[in-house]
Amino acid sequence: PADLGIEALRTHVAGEMQRTRDRSITLTSAVDDDELVEQHSPLMSPLVWDLAHVGSQEEIWLVRDVGGRSAVRPDIDDLYDAFQHARADRPSLPLLGPTEARQYVTTVRDKVLDLLERTPLEGRRLVERAFAFGMIVQHEQQHDETMLATHQLRRGAPVLDDVPPPAAMEADSLPAEVLVPGGPFVMGTSTEPWALDNERPAHEVHVADFCIDTTPVTNGQFLRFIDSGGYDQPRWWSEQGWQYRQHAQLHAPLFWSNEDGTWWRRRFGRVEPVALDEPVVHVCFHEAQAYANWAGKRLPTEQEWEKAARFDPHSGRSLRYPWGQEDPRPEQANLGQRHLRPAPAGAYPAGAAPCGARQLLGDVWEWTASDFLPYPGFAAFPYREYSEVFFGTGHKVLRGGSFGTDAAACRGTFRNWDYPIRRQIFAGFRCARTPGRDELS
Ligand code: AVJ
Ligand code: FE
Protein backbone atom coordinates (compact mmCIF):
# COMPACT_ATOMS: atom_id res chain seq x y z
CA PRO A 1 0.00 0.00 0.00
CA ALA A 2 3.02 2.36 0.36
CA ASP A 3 2.87 3.85 -3.10
CA LEU A 4 -0.91 4.13 -3.46
CA GLY A 5 -2.58 7.52 -3.82
CA ILE A 6 -4.94 8.65 -1.04
CA GLU A 7 -8.14 7.52 -2.73
CA ALA A 8 -6.65 4.19 -3.74
CA LEU A 9 -5.46 3.79 -0.14
CA ARG A 10 -9.01 4.29 1.17
CA THR A 11 -10.36 1.76 -1.32
CA HIS A 12 -7.60 -0.69 -0.46
CA VAL A 13 -8.26 -0.44 3.29
CA ALA A 14 -12.04 -0.75 2.87
CA GLY A 15 -11.50 -3.82 0.68
CA GLU A 16 -9.18 -5.45 3.20
CA MET A 17 -11.67 -4.74 6.00
CA GLN A 18 -14.48 -6.35 4.06
CA ARG A 19 -12.44 -9.37 2.96
CA THR A 20 -11.31 -9.94 6.54
CA ARG A 21 -14.79 -9.51 7.99
CA ASP A 22 -16.14 -12.07 5.52
CA ARG A 23 -13.72 -14.60 6.99
CA SER A 24 -14.63 -13.69 10.59
CA ILE A 25 -18.29 -14.18 9.73
CA THR A 26 -17.58 -17.54 8.09
CA LEU A 27 -15.67 -18.73 11.16
CA THR A 28 -18.48 -17.64 13.49
CA SER A 29 -21.40 -18.85 11.34
CA ALA A 30 -20.02 -22.31 10.59
CA VAL A 31 -21.12 -23.59 13.99
CA ASP A 32 -24.52 -22.98 15.53
CA ASP A 33 -25.08 -20.26 18.10
CA ASP A 34 -25.07 -22.68 21.06
CA GLU A 35 -21.59 -23.74 20.14
CA LEU A 36 -20.38 -20.17 19.63
CA VAL A 37 -20.67 -19.46 23.35
CA GLU A 38 -19.02 -22.75 24.36
CA GLN A 39 -15.42 -23.13 25.33
CA HIS A 40 -13.59 -25.89 23.47
CA SER A 41 -10.43 -25.61 25.52
CA PRO A 42 -9.37 -23.44 28.49
CA LEU A 43 -6.59 -22.22 26.17
CA MET A 44 -9.09 -20.51 23.92
CA SER A 45 -11.96 -18.04 24.19
CA PRO A 46 -15.47 -18.92 23.11
CA LEU A 47 -15.72 -17.86 19.43
CA VAL A 48 -18.33 -15.25 20.36
CA TRP A 49 -15.74 -13.52 22.57
CA ASP A 50 -13.26 -13.20 19.68
CA LEU A 51 -15.96 -11.71 17.46
CA ALA A 52 -17.02 -8.99 19.90
CA HIS A 53 -13.40 -8.37 20.95
CA VAL A 54 -12.53 -7.59 17.33
CA GLY A 55 -15.39 -5.06 17.31
CA SER A 56 -14.36 -3.62 20.65
CA GLN A 57 -10.75 -2.97 19.53
CA GLU A 58 -12.06 -1.43 16.31
CA GLU A 59 -14.33 0.84 18.34
CA ILE A 60 -11.56 1.91 20.74
CA TRP A 61 -8.81 2.55 18.18
CA LEU A 62 -10.74 3.80 15.18
CA VAL A 63 -14.14 5.15 16.25
CA ARG A 64 -12.87 6.81 19.43
CA ASP A 65 -9.13 7.40 18.97
CA VAL A 66 -8.75 8.23 15.26
CA GLY A 67 -12.31 9.47 14.77
CA GLY A 68 -12.78 11.27 18.08
CA ARG A 69 -16.38 10.06 18.00
CA SER A 70 -18.55 9.06 20.90
CA ALA A 71 -18.43 5.52 22.23
CA VAL A 72 -20.78 2.85 20.89
CA ARG A 73 -20.67 0.57 23.94
CA PRO A 74 -18.42 2.08 26.65
CA ASP A 75 -19.94 -0.40 29.10
CA ILE A 76 -18.28 -3.43 27.51
CA ASP A 77 -14.65 -2.29 27.20
CA ASP A 78 -13.67 -4.28 30.24
CA LEU A 79 -15.33 -7.54 29.12
CA TYR A 80 -13.30 -7.59 25.91
CA ASP A 81 -10.02 -6.39 27.37
CA ALA A 82 -7.71 -9.40 26.97
CA PHE A 83 -5.64 -8.22 29.95
CA GLN A 84 -8.61 -8.10 32.34
CA HIS A 85 -9.80 -11.65 31.87
CA ALA A 86 -7.80 -14.80 31.13
CA ARG A 87 -9.09 -16.97 28.29
CA ALA A 88 -10.11 -19.70 30.73
CA ASP A 89 -12.46 -17.27 32.56
CA ARG A 90 -14.13 -15.69 29.54
CA PRO A 91 -17.10 -18.08 29.21
CA SER A 92 -18.38 -17.06 32.66
CA LEU A 93 -18.48 -13.33 31.79
CA PRO A 94 -21.77 -11.61 30.88
CA LEU A 95 -20.73 -11.52 27.21
CA LEU A 96 -22.82 -10.25 24.33
CA GLY A 97 -24.77 -13.15 22.86
CA PRO A 98 -24.27 -14.23 19.22
CA THR A 99 -26.99 -11.94 17.81
CA GLU A 100 -25.89 -8.94 19.88
CA ALA A 101 -22.24 -9.52 19.02
CA ARG A 102 -23.00 -9.60 15.28
CA GLN A 103 -25.04 -6.41 15.55
CA TYR A 104 -22.32 -4.74 17.58
CA VAL A 105 -19.50 -5.46 15.10
CA THR A 106 -21.72 -4.27 12.23
CA THR A 107 -22.60 -1.00 14.00
CA VAL A 108 -18.92 -0.33 14.70
CA ARG A 109 -17.94 -1.20 11.12
CA ASP A 110 -20.52 1.18 9.63
CA LYS A 111 -19.06 4.02 11.70
CA VAL A 112 -15.54 3.09 10.69
CA LEU A 113 -16.39 3.04 6.97
CA ASP A 114 -17.89 6.49 7.36
CA LEU A 115 -14.77 7.61 9.20
CA LEU A 116 -12.52 6.14 6.55
CA GLU A 117 -14.22 8.33 3.92
CA ARG A 118 -13.98 11.51 5.98
CA THR A 119 -10.68 11.17 7.84
CA PRO A 120 -8.03 13.38 6.29
CA LEU A 121 -5.31 10.93 5.36
CA GLU A 122 -3.12 13.70 3.94
CA GLY A 123 -0.23 15.42 5.59
CA ARG A 124 1.81 14.68 8.60
CA ARG A 125 -0.58 12.30 10.30
CA LEU A 126 -1.12 10.23 7.15
CA VAL A 127 1.17 7.42 8.24
CA GLU A 128 -0.24 7.31 11.74
CA ARG A 129 -3.88 7.32 10.66
CA ALA A 130 -3.45 4.91 7.79
CA PHE A 131 -1.49 2.67 10.15
CA ALA A 132 -4.32 2.62 12.71
CA PHE A 133 -6.63 1.16 10.04
CA GLY A 134 -3.98 -1.34 8.98
CA MET A 135 -3.35 -2.35 12.57
CA ILE A 136 -7.03 -3.00 13.17
CA VAL A 137 -7.34 -5.06 9.98
CA GLN A 138 -4.34 -7.17 11.05
CA HIS A 139 -5.76 -7.50 14.55
CA GLU A 140 -8.94 -9.04 13.14
CA GLN A 141 -6.86 -11.30 10.87
CA GLN A 142 -4.87 -12.49 13.90
CA HIS A 143 -8.10 -13.34 15.67
CA ASP A 144 -9.28 -15.18 12.54
CA GLU A 145 -6.25 -17.44 12.98
CA THR A 146 -6.99 -17.79 16.70
CA MET A 147 -10.59 -18.74 15.82
CA LEU A 148 -9.30 -21.28 13.30
CA ALA A 149 -7.22 -22.84 16.11
CA THR A 150 -10.42 -23.02 18.17
CA HIS A 151 -12.11 -24.79 15.25
CA GLN A 152 -9.26 -27.32 15.21
CA LEU A 153 -9.85 -27.98 18.93
CA ARG A 154 -13.60 -28.49 18.62
CA ARG A 155 -15.14 -31.95 18.41
CA GLY A 156 -17.73 -32.82 15.79
CA ALA A 157 -18.17 -33.03 12.06
CA PRO A 158 -16.22 -30.77 9.65
CA VAL A 159 -17.83 -27.36 9.07
CA LEU A 160 -15.21 -25.38 7.12
CA ASP A 161 -14.56 -25.63 3.38
CA ASP A 162 -11.16 -25.62 1.75
CA VAL A 163 -9.31 -26.88 -1.30
CA PRO A 164 -6.25 -29.17 -1.31
CA PRO A 165 -2.85 -27.45 -1.25
CA PRO A 166 -0.43 -27.82 -4.19
CA ALA A 167 1.85 -30.86 -4.45
CA ALA A 168 5.56 -30.84 -3.68
CA MET A 169 7.86 -29.98 -6.58
CA GLU A 170 11.08 -32.00 -7.00
CA ALA A 171 11.05 -32.58 -3.25
CA ASP A 172 13.35 -35.58 -3.56
CA SER A 173 16.02 -33.66 -5.41
CA LEU A 174 16.11 -30.71 -3.01
CA PRO A 175 19.18 -30.47 -0.78
CA ALA A 176 18.31 -31.14 2.88
CA GLU A 177 19.81 -27.80 3.90
CA VAL A 178 21.27 -24.63 2.42
CA LEU A 179 24.27 -22.58 3.54
CA VAL A 180 23.85 -18.89 4.31
CA PRO A 181 27.30 -17.26 4.34
CA GLY A 182 28.21 -15.07 7.31
CA GLY A 183 28.02 -11.29 7.16
CA PRO A 184 25.81 -8.34 8.01
CA PHE A 185 22.22 -7.91 6.93
CA VAL A 186 19.42 -5.48 7.70
CA MET A 187 16.85 -6.97 10.07
CA GLY A 188 13.45 -5.45 10.82
CA THR A 189 11.97 -2.49 8.96
CA SER A 190 11.45 1.24 9.20
CA THR A 191 9.47 1.53 5.96
CA GLU A 192 7.00 -1.38 5.76
CA PRO A 193 3.67 0.49 6.09
CA TRP A 194 1.77 -2.10 8.12
CA ALA A 195 4.69 -3.36 10.21
CA LEU A 196 3.86 -3.47 13.91
CA ASP A 197 6.00 -1.81 16.57
CA ASN A 198 8.03 -4.93 17.41
CA GLU A 199 9.24 -5.27 13.77
CA ARG A 200 10.82 -1.80 13.94
CA PRO A 201 13.27 -0.20 13.42
CA ALA A 202 15.51 -1.58 10.66
CA HIS A 203 18.94 -2.31 12.10
CA GLU A 204 22.09 -4.05 10.93
CA VAL A 205 22.89 -7.43 12.44
CA HIS A 206 25.95 -9.60 11.90
CA VAL A 207 25.07 -13.25 11.44
CA ALA A 208 27.80 -15.92 11.28
CA ASP A 209 27.73 -18.72 8.67
CA PHE A 210 24.86 -21.13 9.23
CA CYS A 211 23.04 -23.95 7.49
CA ILE A 212 19.25 -24.07 7.57
CA ASP A 213 16.87 -26.82 6.47
CA THR A 214 15.46 -26.28 2.98
CA THR A 215 11.94 -27.08 4.21
CA PRO A 216 10.14 -27.40 7.52
CA VAL A 217 10.62 -30.73 9.34
CA THR A 218 8.04 -33.25 8.09
CA ASN A 219 5.80 -35.72 9.91
CA GLY A 220 7.91 -38.53 8.41
CA GLN A 221 11.08 -37.07 9.91
CA PHE A 222 9.38 -36.41 13.21
CA LEU A 223 8.12 -40.01 13.32
CA ARG A 224 11.72 -41.22 13.24
CA PHE A 225 12.34 -39.18 16.39
CA ILE A 226 9.25 -40.74 18.01
CA ASP A 227 10.19 -44.27 16.86
CA SER A 228 13.71 -43.94 18.19
CA GLY A 229 12.31 -43.19 21.64
CA GLY A 230 12.97 -39.45 21.49
CA TYR A 231 10.08 -38.65 23.84
CA ASP A 232 11.55 -40.97 26.49
CA GLN A 233 15.15 -39.81 26.47
CA PRO A 234 15.83 -36.77 28.66
CA ARG A 235 19.18 -36.17 26.94
CA TRP A 236 17.44 -34.58 23.93
CA TRP A 237 15.39 -32.22 26.07
CA SER A 238 16.24 -29.07 27.98
CA GLU A 239 15.63 -29.33 31.72
CA GLN A 240 12.51 -27.16 31.44
CA GLY A 241 11.42 -29.09 28.36
CA TRP A 242 11.79 -32.46 30.03
CA GLN A 243 9.82 -31.25 33.06
CA TYR A 244 7.00 -30.20 30.79
CA ARG A 245 7.24 -33.43 28.75
CA GLN A 246 6.74 -35.35 32.04
CA HIS A 247 4.05 -33.08 33.43
CA ALA A 248 1.94 -33.00 30.25
CA GLN A 249 2.81 -36.60 29.30
CA LEU A 250 3.79 -35.57 25.79
CA HIS A 251 4.34 -38.49 23.44
CA ALA A 252 3.43 -37.17 19.97
CA PRO A 253 2.19 -33.92 18.39
CA LEU A 254 -1.19 -32.65 19.59
CA PHE A 255 -4.15 -34.27 17.76
CA TRP A 256 -2.18 -37.45 16.96
CA SER A 257 -3.26 -40.87 18.15
CA ASN A 258 -1.85 -44.34 17.62
CA GLU A 259 -4.08 -47.28 16.90
CA ASP A 260 -2.59 -50.72 16.32
CA GLY A 261 0.71 -49.23 15.27
CA THR A 262 -0.68 -46.66 12.83
CA TRP A 263 -0.53 -42.94 13.51
CA TRP A 264 -3.71 -40.94 12.88
CA ARG A 265 -4.46 -37.28 13.26
CA ARG A 266 -7.64 -35.34 13.77
CA ARG A 267 -7.91 -32.34 11.49
CA PHE A 268 -10.94 -30.03 11.50
CA GLY A 269 -13.32 -32.84 12.30
CA ARG A 270 -11.76 -35.57 10.15
CA VAL A 271 -9.47 -38.35 11.27
CA GLU A 272 -6.85 -39.28 8.70
CA PRO A 273 -3.52 -41.12 8.54
CA VAL A 274 -0.56 -38.87 9.34
CA ALA A 275 0.82 -37.64 5.98
CA LEU A 276 4.56 -38.31 5.95
CA ASP A 277 5.57 -35.56 3.52
CA GLU A 278 3.69 -32.79 5.32
CA PRO A 279 5.38 -30.35 7.74
CA VAL A 280 4.77 -31.39 11.34
CA VAL A 281 2.39 -29.04 13.14
CA HIS A 282 1.04 -28.68 16.70
CA VAL A 283 4.34 -29.25 18.44
CA CYS A 284 5.55 -26.97 21.22
CA PHE A 285 8.96 -25.28 21.37
CA HIS A 286 10.27 -28.00 23.70
CA GLU A 287 9.37 -30.77 21.24
CA ALA A 288 10.96 -28.82 18.38
CA GLN A 289 14.12 -28.29 20.41
CA ALA A 290 14.29 -31.97 21.44
CA TYR A 291 13.95 -33.06 17.81
CA ALA A 292 16.70 -30.65 16.74
CA ASN A 293 19.07 -31.98 19.42
CA TRP A 294 18.28 -35.56 18.41
CA ALA A 295 19.00 -34.66 14.76
CA GLY A 296 22.39 -33.17 15.74
CA LYS A 297 21.14 -29.70 14.90
CA ARG A 298 19.50 -26.78 16.70
CA LEU A 299 16.66 -24.32 16.13
CA PRO A 300 17.59 -21.20 14.15
CA THR A 301 17.77 -17.90 15.98
CA GLU A 302 15.29 -15.35 14.68
CA GLN A 303 18.22 -13.40 13.19
CA GLU A 304 19.18 -16.49 11.18
CA TRP A 305 15.59 -17.16 10.19
CA GLU A 306 15.08 -13.61 8.94
CA LYS A 307 18.38 -13.55 7.09
CA ALA A 308 17.49 -16.83 5.33
CA ALA A 309 14.07 -15.42 4.45
CA ARG A 310 15.06 -11.90 3.35
CA PHE A 311 18.71 -11.45 2.51
CA ASP A 312 19.47 -11.07 -1.17
CA PRO A 313 23.22 -11.60 -1.68
CA HIS A 314 23.10 -10.07 -5.18
CA SER A 315 21.95 -6.65 -4.01
CA GLY A 316 23.08 -6.93 -0.38
CA ARG A 317 19.57 -5.80 0.58
CA SER A 318 16.79 -7.33 2.63
CA LEU A 319 13.64 -8.24 0.70
CA ARG A 320 10.07 -7.78 1.97
CA TYR A 321 9.32 -11.45 1.26
CA PRO A 322 11.52 -14.45 0.37
CA TRP A 323 10.60 -14.05 -3.32
CA GLY A 324 11.03 -10.30 -3.51
CA GLN A 325 9.03 -7.13 -2.99
CA GLU A 326 5.55 -8.03 -4.29
CA ASP A 327 2.70 -8.98 -1.94
CA PRO A 328 2.10 -12.75 -1.69
CA ARG A 329 0.37 -14.55 -4.56
CA PRO A 330 -1.30 -17.95 -4.06
CA GLU A 331 1.44 -19.77 -5.96
CA GLN A 332 4.12 -18.35 -3.66
CA ALA A 333 2.88 -19.24 -0.19
CA ASN A 334 0.23 -21.18 1.69
CA LEU A 335 -1.48 -18.35 3.55
CA GLY A 336 -5.02 -17.11 4.15
CA GLN A 337 -6.96 -20.24 5.14
CA ARG A 338 -7.45 -21.33 1.51
CA HIS A 339 -6.00 -24.70 2.40
CA LEU A 340 -6.66 -25.85 5.93
CA ARG A 341 -3.40 -27.77 6.13
CA PRO A 342 0.27 -27.27 5.30
CA ALA A 343 1.38 -28.18 1.76
CA PRO A 344 3.91 -31.04 1.45
CA ALA A 345 7.53 -30.10 2.08
CA GLY A 346 9.06 -28.91 -1.18
CA ALA A 347 5.95 -27.15 -2.48
CA TYR A 348 5.95 -23.49 -3.59
CA PRO A 349 9.15 -23.27 -5.68
CA ALA A 350 7.93 -19.79 -6.71
CA GLY A 351 8.18 -18.71 -3.08
CA ALA A 352 11.78 -19.82 -2.52
CA ALA A 353 14.19 -17.41 -0.86
CA PRO A 354 17.47 -16.37 -2.56
CA CYS A 355 19.32 -18.93 -0.36
CA GLY A 356 17.08 -21.69 -1.77
CA ALA A 357 15.00 -22.38 1.35
CA ARG A 358 11.29 -23.00 0.71
CA GLN A 359 8.04 -22.42 2.58
CA LEU A 360 9.53 -19.86 4.93
CA LEU A 361 6.27 -17.94 4.63
CA GLY A 362 3.01 -19.79 5.15
CA ASP A 363 2.32 -23.49 5.87
CA VAL A 364 3.43 -23.56 9.54
CA TRP A 365 4.70 -21.01 12.04
CA GLU A 366 8.31 -21.86 12.82
CA TRP A 367 9.66 -21.91 16.36
CA THR A 368 12.97 -20.11 16.74
CA ALA A 369 15.55 -20.35 19.53
CA SER A 370 15.03 -16.67 20.39
CA ASP A 371 13.23 -14.98 23.26
CA PHE A 372 10.78 -12.22 22.33
CA LEU A 373 12.75 -9.00 22.95
CA PRO A 374 12.71 -5.46 21.54
CA TYR A 375 15.01 -4.40 18.70
CA PRO A 376 17.47 -1.60 19.46
CA GLY A 377 15.53 1.68 19.16
CA PHE A 378 12.12 0.05 19.81
CA ALA A 379 9.27 2.46 20.55
CA ALA A 380 5.88 1.13 21.69
CA PHE A 381 3.13 2.09 19.21
CA PRO A 382 0.27 2.69 19.52
CA TYR A 383 0.01 1.04 22.93
CA ARG A 384 2.35 -0.80 25.32
CA GLU A 385 0.05 -3.81 25.46
CA TYR A 386 0.55 -4.76 21.84
CA SER A 387 4.17 -5.95 22.30
CA GLU A 388 6.09 -4.24 25.06
CA VAL A 389 4.46 -5.98 28.01
CA PHE A 390 5.43 -9.35 26.49
CA PHE A 391 9.16 -8.65 26.21
CA GLY A 392 11.26 -10.76 28.55
CA THR A 393 8.30 -12.73 29.90
CA GLY A 394 9.35 -16.18 28.70
CA HIS A 395 7.82 -16.04 25.23
CA LYS A 396 9.63 -17.58 22.25
CA VAL A 397 9.55 -16.02 18.78
CA LEU A 398 7.80 -17.79 15.91
CA ARG A 399 8.30 -16.72 12.31
CA GLY A 400 6.76 -17.04 8.88
CA GLY A 401 3.00 -17.44 9.36
CA SER A 402 0.90 -20.53 8.74
CA PHE A 403 -1.85 -21.67 6.38
CA GLY A 404 -4.17 -19.90 8.84
CA THR A 405 -2.43 -16.51 8.65
CA ASP A 406 -3.71 -13.81 6.33
CA ALA A 407 -1.25 -12.61 3.69
CA ALA A 408 -1.71 -9.03 4.96
CA ALA A 409 -0.81 -10.08 8.51
CA CYS A 410 2.53 -11.61 7.59
CA ARG A 411 5.79 -10.55 5.92
CA GLY A 412 9.50 -11.30 6.20
CA THR A 413 9.83 -9.07 9.25
CA PHE A 414 6.72 -10.30 11.10
CA ARG A 415 7.30 -11.62 14.63
CA ASN A 416 4.85 -13.82 16.50
CA TRP A 417 5.42 -15.04 20.04
CA ASP A 418 4.03 -17.61 22.43
CA TYR A 419 4.95 -19.64 25.48
CA PRO A 420 7.29 -22.57 24.78
CA ILE A 421 4.64 -25.07 25.94
CA ARG A 422 1.91 -24.02 23.49
CA ARG A 423 0.74 -26.62 20.94
CA GLN A 424 -2.71 -25.49 19.80
CA ILE A 425 -1.23 -22.90 17.41
CA PHE A 426 -0.29 -23.92 13.86
CA ALA A 427 3.38 -24.24 14.73
CA GLY A 428 6.12 -26.47 13.37
CA PHE A 429 9.82 -25.74 12.84
CA ARG A 430 12.91 -26.24 10.73
CA CYS A 431 16.43 -26.88 12.02
CA ALA A 432 19.71 -25.02 11.61
CA ARG A 433 23.33 -25.75 12.44
CA THR A 434 26.70 -24.06 12.48
CA PRO A 435 28.84 -25.57 9.71
CA GLY A 436 32.27 -26.95 10.52
CA ARG A 437 35.39 -25.14 9.21
CA ASP A 438 36.09 -27.83 6.61
CA GLU A 439 32.65 -27.36 5.07
CA LEU A 440 33.24 -23.69 4.30
CA SER A 441 36.30 -23.80 2.05
C1 AVJ B 1 0.77 -11.75 18.10
C2 AVJ B 1 -0.58 -13.70 18.03
C3 AVJ B 1 0.76 -13.23 19.96
O1 AVJ B 1 -3.02 -13.39 19.64
O2 AVJ B 1 -1.99 -12.94 21.48
C4 AVJ B 1 -4.31 -10.32 19.25
C5 AVJ B 1 -1.94 -10.99 18.61
N1 AVJ B 1 -2.73 -9.11 20.10
N2 AVJ B 1 -4.86 -9.38 20.01
C6 AVJ B 1 -2.16 -12.80 20.28
C7 AVJ B 1 -2.97 -10.17 19.31
C8 AVJ B 1 -3.90 -8.64 20.55
C9 AVJ B 1 -1.18 -11.85 19.56
N3 AVJ B 1 -0.09 -12.62 18.91
FE1 FE C 1 -6.88 -9.12 20.38
Image (tube, helix red, strand yellow):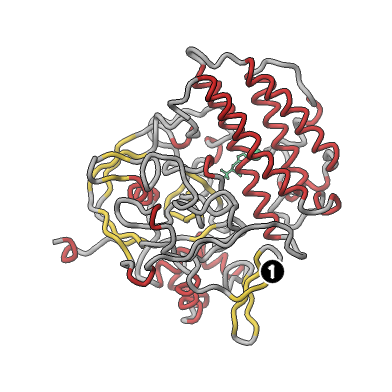
Circle 1: residue type: Arg
Task: Give percent across and percent down for residue 16.
Answer: 59, 35
Is residue 383 among what the camera can see?
no
In terms of depth relative to the viewer, which is nearer, 86 or 105? Answer: 105
Task: Give percent across and percent down for residue 1.
Answer: 48, 30
Task: Give percent across and percent down for residue 40.
Answer: 75, 57
* In this view, 73 is above or below 349: above
Quarter of the view holding residue 206: top left
Q: Secondary structure at mark 1?
A: strand
Quarter of the view holding residue 158: bottom right
Task: Give percent across and percent down for residue 267.
Answer: 65, 65
Residue under the image location 39 percent in, 53 percent down: 350
Q: Quadrant of the C terminus?
A: bottom left
User: Is 277 left or right of 89, judged from the image as shown?
Assistant: left
Residue of label 1: 270
User: Is 64 left or right of 121, judged from the image as shown?
Assistant: right
* In this view, 82 is above or below 250: above
* In this view, 286 is above or below 401: below
Is residue 267 among what the camera can see?
yes
Q: Quadrant of ligand 2?
A: top right
Residue sitting farthest toward the left: 441
Residue under the image location 69 percent in, 20 percent down: 114
- Looking at the image, how many numbered discs can be counted on the residues? 1
In terms of depth relative to the viewer, which is nearer, 358 or 66? Answer: 358
Residue under the image location 67 percent in, 59 percent down: 152
